Structure formats: structure tokens, C-alpha cells
Image (spheres, rainbow, N blue to C red):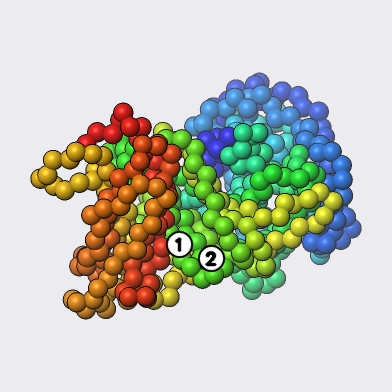
Amino acid sequence: MDRRSLLLHLAATAGLTGLPLSALMTPRPAVASKVPVPEQFDFAWLKGHARHLADQPHAPTREQVPQALKDISWDDYQSIRFKADQALWHNEDTPFEIGFFHLGLYFQEPVHLFELVNGQPREIPYSPDNFTYKGEQSLQGLPDDLGYAGFRVRFHTDDERDLAAFLGASYFRAVGESMQYGLSARGLAVDTALDSGEEFPRFTAFWFQPPPAGSTRLTLYALLESDSVTGAYAFDLYPGRDMVMDIDAALYPRRTIERVGIAPLTSMYQMGENDRRMANDWRPEIHDSDGLSLWTGAGEWIWRPLRNPRHLQVNSFLDDNPRGFGLLQRDRDFDHYQDDSVFYGKRPSLWVEPGSNWGEGSVMLVEIPTADETMDNIVAFWHPKEPLEPGREHLFSYRLTWGEKPPASPDNLATVEATRTGIGGVVGQERTYFSRRFAIDFAGGLLGMMGEDAEVEPVIEVSRGKVEITSARPLGSINGYRAMFDLVPDDSPEPIDLRVYLRLGDQPLTETWVYQYSPPPVEERDF
């Protein structure tokens, strides 16, 4: 399963139409659910079941989706609509309803879905009668045990738009007050950006706990499986202006995993003000997120603008007990996007707050080249220093917050408003060597309180090359400051790491801006 397919499908509503009835009547042998049904379900049972599975070889799902559903067109798939009156808990005394996605196209492995009735699991049966289809087509020939691809959550305040959706591998998404989908989260990342290839664990079963009367918390559980690991997950969803999810994960590796990603976030960055490499669209910017924000265990705030690199880039930010990290969409100015169709300026940010001692490790950022906006090419996750060993239980708890602004922000520190890059040198003077100009705008914190004589200076560090033409000057349009400098790289095309913050005397005034710049080969350095 590749990221392009996942993102394309996640963007869709469930749909299917225009297929001849005979094509849908491909026989399929019935396969009983491989998920045992205990007399009483709780999270302890699920953890025990996941631990038991980890001691056995992985048994992939055997169910076969009819060929016509595999070959269905994108438009036909989108046209399926789940009937609202068939949703779980419809017309019951709860503010939540659960609707379901149809199998087909990119998603050909069913998930087992259970409702917990007085603690007893009751599997939710599939029926083609739960869907409407474009035209007069009937799906009576589909197997009665076909199953569902995933589910969506809706709230009593809006019965047309989703609060969250779980669909494909271990991917899920949610919305904040804008009710606009954007980036995704996953249950677990395994071997991301390694030459050995990435593994995509799947949520193979879910259990839904009916909320008590008057409750606005939705609790659900999930079983995660792959060749390398099993896991038990508990989700508590709290909708509001932000969607808050409290997650407890218990992981049971089948093998030592070289690169495990806890709380992985997946997003898209094609082009923006700091990276114009793929600026071939009429819209000025195209991205779900524009930067990685880090709040380290030592209390430092770091902002790393995202890029669409020419080659795969993997950065690690070492830390001990991080306080939080997230992929944010800080820029919300419509004029910067001019997009009145998919509304990138309304995409939610996603913040991860560890709920327990995560110890030593690193926040990893993976940036993958992409030619267009249909591929999610950005991944961020926590990678523990100590490997997850088989035969042991590994527990992680954390909170996800989906919304326009993260729940944590720097105290009295200005944040990065924009990053711009371009040709270096002095306007009007002949350039005799190659250099790259960087302009970073900071706003907020104490910057608006600086007097005219305040000696605000930029602190600039680079891993290679020479820095010149440095400045930090007030920028009235944002009531902040602009730091500028030129970087003269050496002859190597290898990436150069940069760090910048503003200070007044010994007092830091801003978060720390970090960047990775890859100089062009010497023969391509026009000046």
C-alpha cells in the first residue's frame, strides 16, 4: 500500500456506481472472523489477545474482495453513500453516530467492527442495503459477509460532515472547528524511509463503546497487526473547537524493529514561500502543513519549515522526554493560497503531547520528493532510543489535538511567521560568487515592545559554509522583526544545517528556526 493510494482514498467519501450486476457476483468463500469474541471485553483482554498474537506468525487476512470492486473507477467509488439512517446509534440517546466505508478500489482488506453491549462484543454485520448507489444498480450479488473498509464519526451538531475517519492501514484523521480534513495520523510507523522498505501495520478490528447518556466522550478500541508487531489501542475522543484524542498503546513486537515510529503524523508539502522547486501551479502555495514544531524536554521551542526536496531527506532531533511536537499549518491567509476548492488555509494542525515518560529518543522528520499534491510526502514521529524488543510489552500514552492552533505555544517568545529564500548578494552590485539569501520573519512575544534603540541581533549558526550580510530589523507589517543573511556554501552539494534566533543581550526573544539547505552542484550555481 503506497502513500499516494492512501491519500487519494482518504480524501473520498464512500462511493460506488455504474457497475454491471453480473460483474459483482464473483463468488467468494465465506471466512469466519478470526477475531475471538470474549464473553466480556475490556482493554486488558485486548492487550492479552495482542500479546498472544505476537507469539505466532502473522496470518494476513484471507477474505477476497470481488474483482469488480478491485477494478472500480475512482469516480464510481466516490459515488457510494452510506445511508445515514443505518448508522450505529442513529436515533439513540447519544450525540455520536458511526457510519461505514465500503470495500473496494485501494482498500481491499476488511476490518472487523464490534459494538460493546453491556461489555459483550457484538459484530456489526455488513449489508449492501446500507448503501445508496448512483443510478439503478443493485448489489444483491455481493457476499453477505463482505465487511467494511473503515468507519467515520459524526456528532449531533452536524449530521453531514465527519469529525473523524479511520480508513486504510492504521491511518485516521480528524477535524477542528473549520470542519476541514487535512493531514493524517497513524497507529504506528515501521521502518519508514529505510532501504529495506516500509511496513504498514493495519488496524484489523475495532470495538465501539456506547457513550453513557449525556456524555460527549467516545471510547473505541483497536487491534493492530503486521508482520513485525501487534498492538492494542484505546482511543478517547473529545470533540469541540479542537478534536482531542487520548491514546493508550500497548505494543508487542514479533521482531526487533530497526526504526519504529510512535505517534506518526503524515502530511503533504508541495510548494510554499520558502520552497518554490515545484511551483508549477496557478496557486501560490500548496500544502497541508508548513512546518514541524518541537517543544523539547529542556524547554526549547524549535520551528522547522517543511520542504519538497529533490531527494529523500531524513532529519533527527535528539531529545529526552519531549514535551510535544506537531505538524502545523501556521499560515492561514487565503490570499497566500487562493484555493477556493480544497481550502489549504483551513487545514488543521496536529499536536502530539506525550502522556508519560518517553525517555531518550528523537523526533524524526522524513521529507519525500513529490510532483503534485496527491501524495503525502511528509512524515514525523517519535523514535525511541531503546529498540522495542520482542517478548516484551511496550506502553505509550499520548494526546493528539487537531485544530487551527496547537494547545501549547512559547511563553514570551516570538514565533516564525514566514521563511523566504532567494539569490544572495547586493542589489545593483555584480555578483562574482554564488550565495543564498534567507529571510525569516518573527512576530509575537516581546518583539512588539522593543524600543527604537533596542539592539536586537540574530544568532546564526551553520554546519558548513560562510555567513555574510546579516541583519535583524523591525517589520511593522507584522509588528515583529525580519532576520536576513546570506549563506555562501562550500563546493559540496550535501545538506547544510542552519539555526537562527533573535536575542537582546543574553535574552532570547524568539523560538529557534532550523533549516536544511541543499546547495546545487557547483556547475549549476548561476549568479
Q: Amino acid at mark 1?
A: Ile
- Please name the residue shown 81% across and 49% down the image: 390
Q: Residues within 10 Å of mark 1 (few under 14, many from 20)?
A: many
Q: Is residue 432 above or below residue 439?
A: above
Residue 152 or residue 82, whichever sits in front: 152
Residue beneath disc 2: 296
Q: Amino acid at mark 2?
A: Thr
Left or right: where 430 falls relative to 516: left
Residue beneath disc 1: 302
The residue most toward the right is 39
- Please name the residue shown 63% across and 27% down the image: 70
Q: Residues within 10 Å of mark 2 (few under 14, many from 20)?
A: some
> Can the viewer see residue 399?
no
Rendered-image quadrant of the C terminus: top left
Rendered-image quadrant of the N terminus: top right
Q: Is residue 67 above or below residue 167?
A: above
**Label 1 secondary element:** strand
